[in-house]
Image (cartoon, grey):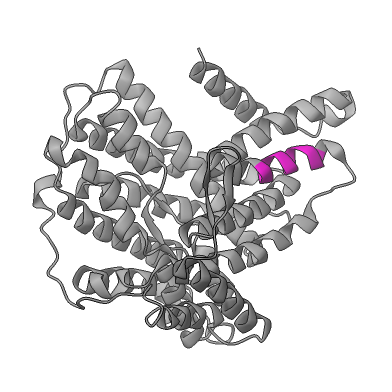
Amino acid sequence: MLEKLFGFNPKQHKVRTEIYAGITTFFTMAYILAVNPSIFSALEAKGMPTDAVFTATVLASVVGSLAMALYAKKPFGLAPGMGINAFFVFTVCLGMGYSWQFALTAVFIEGILFILLSLFKIRELIANAIPTSMKAAIGGGIGLFIAFIGLQNCGLIVANDSTQVALASFDSPSVVLALIGVIICGLLVVRNVQGGLLWGILLTALIGVPMGVTHLDKVFSVPPSVAPIFLQFEWSHIWSWDMVIVVLTFLFVDLFDTIGTVIAVSMKTNMVDKDGNVEGVGRMLMADAVATTAGACLGTSSTTTYVESAAGVAVGGRTGLTAFVVALCFVSALFFAPLFLAIPSSATGPALVIVGVMMCSDTTKVIWDDYTEAIPAFITMLLMPLSYSISDGIMLGVIVYVVMKMGKGAKTCKEISPTMWVLFAIFLARYIQQNI
């Protein structure tokens, strides 16, 4: 039964490990339950109820994770994506002045385009066309990015007017708890404790109670209705140039965020063939596309594969059972949201830092002695955390890759695949268009 549903092989996998992995992934991405409604609260005055967005966030995560579990049979959790939700609210609705119904329509169209791209295996073609060194760099870059997210979430890294970022002051209990969490998670991983990251999160949260960082006011809550934002589309502007720009922006960011995450985590778990191509990537990308379309119907921004899935993979998650557990956790969050949200970022952030360390191991596969490979790989890794965007890291890395190969001479030019040439032209045009 488990093998048919989730690709679970009892000779290779353990149910307990998959459960640990799913719960770990959920806890590391559960912040979206608080953050997504918080971002969308800016649209409350425009008639988009924030409490309904909470329910939509949960349901979109459930649908996406179930699609990944049952169709792709891979250990990835899905939820409305960070960054793209801010673009939805602050650029499309507040900046351009369009309604949230217009933005939801754009997300829905993007989802349909994603499904078509997946059906014709265009997304799969793109994922497999990325060179091995670049794939390894994507893994390392996401490792740095996820660690940076963790450090920010737990308050160890803060904003600074002079240097942009700085180390936080240690006079804050939450910062001290985060340091304790890094040590606890690190030691549990060093000692190969089963489910070490999950136990690290829970133990850190428990320590936070006497420190005044972890607060639990109530356990149960009734989920708000999603009816006010369900299937709320606006078709009057679908042929406008602004709609084209918005849809393409959603498309680019979601496409390469997902491809980057899938490639990086798959390489970490050896879910690749002898040529470095991701096994089952087509099904994974289709699950993501279906999740985005469903999310738009439910009333939230693009749903995407979460980089925090690496936390569950690090625990040992390898099958769709992990994603299924993530989905179950989100279902329970509908009714026990106060309990899950009581776990502070000071407890989940340290786990992401340790996951970042694990993800960076793939950088040994970069050919560092060949600068036509090393420079684009380094640019990819560097820009992901600094630009706060997986997609920008990949796109600029591809541009630099082609330029470096061209610059060295005709011999290395032959190493550039036709797909990479096409991607180079598209990405270059995108950045030129952005600055015109």
Could you tell me which residue is drawn at 48 percent across and 76 percent down? 21
Question: Residue 324's x, y, as percent?
Answer: 37, 72
- Position of 429 with respect to 214 (left or right) is right
- Range of residues picked out in magenta: 373-382
Question: Residue 396's x, y, as percent?
Answer: 64, 33
Question: Residue 47's x, y, as percent?
Answer: 11, 39
Whether residue 170 is situated above or below residue 139 in the rendered picture: below
Could you tell me which residue is drawn at 43 percent across and 44 percent down? 119
Q: Is residue 43 magenta?
A: no
The image quadrant of residue 268 is: bottom right
Could you tell me which residue is drawn at 54 percent across and 59 percent down? 169
Please say whether residue 225 is visible from this viewpoint. Answer: yes
Q: Residue furthest top?
A: 436
- Position of 104 with respect to 303 (left or right) is left
Q: Is residue 379 magenta?
A: yes
Pick the residue in front: 342 or 97.
342
Name the magenta segment's main secondary structure.
helix
The image quadrant of residue 131 is: top right
Could you tell me which residue is drawn at 41 percent across and 70 percent down? 27
